[in-house]
Image (tube, grey):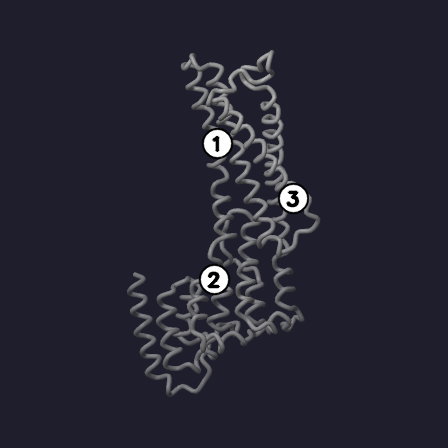
Amino acid sequence: MAHQIFIYMKLEYEMFMSSISEMNDQIGIESGVAQAIFSAVKAGNVNLVDFIFGKIAKEKRELLYRVRDGKRRNILMSAVQHRQAEIFGMICRLKEATATLLPTRDNHGNNILHVAGTLTEFSPLLEGAALKMQTEVQWFKEVESLCNPMFSNERNYAGLSPEQVFMHTHKELMKEGEQWMKETASSCTVIGALIMTIMFAAAFTIPGGNNQDTGFPIFLNRKLFKIFIITDSVSLFSSSISVLMFLGILTSRTYEAKDFLKSLPEKMIIGLSTLLLSIGTMMIAFTCAILIMLREELWIVLPLVGLAIVPVSLYVFMLYGVLRDMIVSTYGLGTIS
């Protein structure tokens, strides 16, 4: 079906190009080819946009400026509005096309940065308001990096700069992102503090007790005991780090858009990762302690060891998706390819 539509659009385009030399009027949204292009941009149909747009850029470059939608936005602005990063990157690789399309404005006086700073229903649907806010800031910053610095100071007909438009349209999303960050950090802080307390106490109440004459642990020379001490220490230190990271999120005085770009996500990534490490090493320390004390009672030890895996598995199951998306979004290749 998609292939048939592509062939149909190709034939329509060829008919359009054969008669374009006779046309003197500006090409608007009423043009069949213009509708095809903007529909393809909205749907993210890269192949169709590449074909039609490439032909126009090669054969009738002067039409790049004329092809507009109902809001007088060109193809590049439409790609930004619909958050189509692949199409935007494809057009930006055509330097001449970029030079023609970047400086234009729509019928509200918005330049391409105003469009990038407007929160729309086409923004990516991500889990968590903070992650969505981060993606929006990344999108705005990357579009800004391709524009003339003067674009950042230009004002639309409402007298707003691109940054003011961004702050105005993202106000509610920023509040939701702040609330999500604080609620997540608050819950994880309680867990991290509890683990830190337990592992600190476990270091001084070691399995088997101490030798009354020397004061050294009775099972000091056993490998399991050494593993217990190491994992107990790792759990204590990693839970301490996670608590500090979450406290850093909770005690932040102000939440600005730039904080969602790197600062807050990095703290959350470190906090969640170290909390996972602390839970895992706590279960290993627990298993070692059980094996030391009940090494001859395998019918008791084996079920307990199996149950020790459950908390770690549940934690990974609940938070893996958020942690993975946050790592990819923060340290990935960026919004625009």
Residue at x 50% of width, y 27% of height: 283
Task: Name the N-terminal-most of marks 1 and 2.
Answer: 1
The foreground one among 192 and 50 is 192
The foreground one among 141 and 41 is 141
State the residue position of label 1: 312
Residue 151 - label: none
Residue at x 62% of width, y 56% of height: 257
Q: Looking at the picture, how far across and down is residue 170, in whole percent?
A: 61, 57
How crowded pointer 2 is (Cα within 10 Å; few <14, some 14-19, many 20+) is rated as some
The foreground one among 277 and 173 is 277
Q: Are marks 1 and 3 in contact (CB under 8 Å)?
A: no
Q: Are marks 2 and 3 in contact (CB under 8 Å)?
A: no
**Under tag 3, what secondary structure?**
helix
Single out the mark in the foreground, 2 or 3.
3
State the residue position of label 2: 336
Query: Is 267 placed above or below 120 here?
Result: above
Q: Looking at the picture, how far across and down is residue 41, in whole percent?
A: 43, 66
Task: Name the N-terminal-most of marks 1 and 3.
Answer: 3
The amino acid marked with disc number 3 is: Gly
Q: Quadrant of the N terminus?
A: bottom left
The amino acid marked with disc number 1 is: Val
